[in-house]
Structures are given as structure tokens and as C-alpha cells.
Image (tube, rainbow, N blue to C red):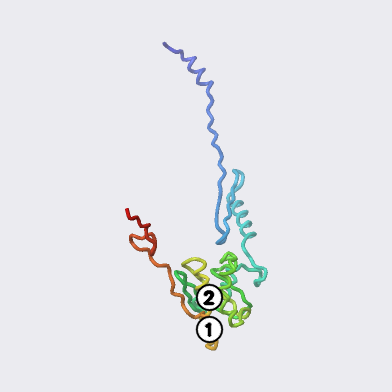
Amino acid sequence: MALSVSSLTSSFTSLSFSHKAKSKPFAISFVPSRRFTITASASDTESIAEILANAAEAAARITPTRPDLPGGMSVEKYMKSRLPGGIAAQEILTTGRRKCAVARVALQEGNGKIIVNYREAKDYFQGNAVYLQYLTRPLVALGLEKRYDIFVKTHGGGLSGQAQAVCLGVARALLKISEENRPTLRNEGLLTRDARIVERKKAGFKKARKREQFSKR
């Protein structure tokens, strides 16, 4: 069956094609600090420069600052200002270890501030009273908890091991300050490196010593 040219032309003209592209919003994400992430989305009418300016302004508003620190600076800037040349360049620097955790501790005269990995100790150790007690235990034993500031860089292990590593590091730093602190710290058992670690799993066992249940038949 033959079709006329006019009928084909009319059928094609009745069809409508849409070539308008759908606009998709774009988003820009960046991390202004270790704990915050800013995401800014834009419509077609906004420029990338405006989005970046808005995101930077939002990041500045939420950057963690401490009003009790000089100039209201952040904890990270405060620690860097107190440790010129980095923690490795400090005069009173010791190392504490516990399980898989390693802590480098620098002691300076101050009023009792404790900063761990550029964060407040209470924030870093999630407000755990036991872990926080480990940090100041050597200072409390000598009655010096309000005379020194503690700056720590730690890695490895968990929070429990890191807290006990800091405790050993603080005790060794106090011993470095004055040899007269040795008897008190020794009597409290704060100068002894705790060598206990998790025993390795054995082949054929469920854990280090746990076996499968014995079945006679």
C-alpha cells in the first residue's frame, strides 16, 4: 500500500521534539578542618565564584575556636605557636608506649592545658573520665597539675592504649625536669613500661588459647 508524500509530511509536522537541556545543579564540597565538611550547591544563575565565597564564609563560621586561648585562635594554631619548630624540636620531649600506641609528649610551663593531636584532650578522648585521668596521673601524684601544659602527638592502637602511653610519657618528662621526682613516680608505678599485649592467635585454635568444643564421638 502506497502512502502519499503529503500524508507523510503532515504526520512529521505533527510530531514535536524537545531539545532543551535539563539544568542540573552542581555542588562543591571541601573540608575546612579535620572535623567539618562544607557542601554548597548552586543553581544555573549563580556563579562558581559566589558559591566558593559562600562556602568559605560558612567554613569560617564553624572553625573551632577557643575564647580562652590568646586571640580566640583555634587549638591547632595555638599548639603550633607554643611549639616552634614542631614537637620534635622541644627541649622536654619524651616517648611513651602501651600496646600498639606510641605517644610523643612535650611539657611546658603553663596552667594545665592538654592538647592531643591538635585537639583538646576531652574532645580527643571523647570525654572518657578514665582516659582523661591517665593523662594527669603523674602530675597529680606530684601536685603539679596546674603548673604544666601537655602537648601530645600520638598514633597507633586505640584510645585506651594511647591514654596510657601519654601517662608514661608525662611521667618520663617529669623525671627529665627533676630527678627528685623519681621516688614518688616510682612508688606510684608510673615509670614502668607495661609490656602486656594481646597474645597472638594460634593455628587450629579459635583465639590465642580458646579451642573448639571437644566431642568424643
Q: Mark 1 or 2 closer to N-term? A: 2
The amino acid pointed to by label 1 is Asn
The picture quadrant where one finds residue 148 is bottom right
Q: Position of residue 199 (x, y in %)?
A: 40, 67
The amino acid pointed to by label 2 is Cys
Mark 1 crowd level (few <14, some 14–19, many ≥20, 10 Å Cα): few
User: What residue appears at the point 38 percent right and 66 percent down from the top-left corner?
Assistant: 200
User: What residue appears at the point 56 percent right and 68 percent down from the top-left corner?
Assistant: 118
Residue reaching furthest to the front:
216
Under circle 1, the secondary element is helix
Residue 169 numbered tag: none
Q: Is residue 43 above or below residue 30?
A: above
Foreground residue, 130 or 58? 130
Task: Tell me the CA gap for discs 1 and 2.
Answer: 15 Å
Residue reaching furthest to the left:
217
Residue reaching furthest to the right:
67
Q: Quadrant of the N terminus?
A: top left
Q: How many marks?
A: 2
Under circle 2, the secondary element is helix
Mark 1, residue position = 187
Mark 2 crowd level (few <14, some 14–19, many ≥20, 10 Å Cα): many
Residue 167 numbered tag: 2
Residue reaching furthest to the bottom:
180
Q: Position of residue 145 (x, y in %)?
A: 61, 78
Q: Is residue 38 above or below residue 98?
A: above
Q: Nearer the viewer, mark 1 or mark 2?
A: 1
Foreground residue, 61 or 52? 61
Q: Position of residue 110 (x, y in %)?
A: 62, 79
Q: Position of residue 104 (x, y in %)?
A: 50, 74
